[in-house]
Amino acid sequence: MPMKLLYLLHVLATVIWVGGMFFAHQCLRPAALAQLEPASRLRLWNGVFSRFFPWVWAAVILLTASGLLLIQQMGGMAAVPIHVHIMAAIGYLMAGIFAALYFRPYASLRRAVATEDWPAAGAALNRIRILVGSNLSLGLANIILVFVLPLMD
């Protein structure tokens, strides 16, 4: 696959994932808190995540595959600069955090919303908020890293 196409796919997957987290955490969350009662807010988040998380899974797969192919085309890990190693490590950490979020608190949120157990749903949403905030910080740091460290070479 041509390197330019791999870069494009890598950037698009990053924009979808990190941009989606930024929107959800910094824009949708405050608006939902200000406008909706807890039960409505929890139903909203359950619906938002059910639509966003398949995109995140696709982004994780695409980022991993395109990243590995890009590294391979650049001569392998031994040939790439240190910022690529750091970027990959952060990316794998983010994927792990997302998987943990998806299979634990998001699964709890879905069950709690289905049974209208609002305290449990609220607790699960709070855990999701913390993990999304962590991944958002890591994702933004990775984007900065990609642009700043190469300038120092």
Image: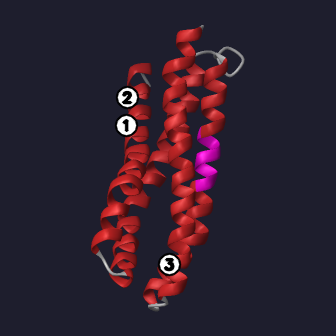
The residue at the far left in this view is 35
Crowding at dot 1, Cα within 10 Å, few <14 / some 14-19 / many 20+, comes out as some
Residues at circles 2 and 1 in contact by the CB criterion of under 8 Å: yes
- Give how far apart the Cα atoms at labels 3 and 1 are: 32 Å
Q: Amino acid at mark 3?
A: Gly
Q: Tell me what residue is drawn at x 43 percent, y 28 percent.
A: 6
Instruction: Name the residue that disc number 3 marks.
Output: 122
Q: Which one is in front in this view, the residue at disc 3 or the one at disc 1? A: 3
* Rendered location of residue 86, percent (x, y): 65, 29
Q: Indicate whether residue 95 is drawn in magenta.
A: yes
Q: Indicate whether residue 129 is drawn in magenta.
A: no
Crowding at dot 3, Cα within 10 Å, few <14 / some 14-19 / many 20+, comes out as some
Q: Quadrant of residue 53?
A: bottom left
Q: Tell me what residue is drawn at x 35 percent, y 76 percent.
A: 41
Q: Amino acid at mark 2?
A: Leu
Residues at circles 3 and 2 in contact by the CB criterion of under 8 Å: no
Quadrant occupied by the N terminus: top left
Relative depth, front residue between 74 and 125? 125
Instruction: Name the residue that disc number 1 marks.
Output: 12
What kind of element bears circle 3?
A: helix
- Residue 44's place in the image compared with 153, above or below, is below
Q: Amino acid at mark 1?
A: Leu
Quadrant occupied by the C terminus: top right
Mark found first going from the N terminus, 3 or 2: 2
Which range of residues does the magenta coloring cover? 91-97
- Give how far apart the Cα atoms at labels 3 and 2 are: 38 Å
Residue 8: which numbered mark, if any?
A: 2
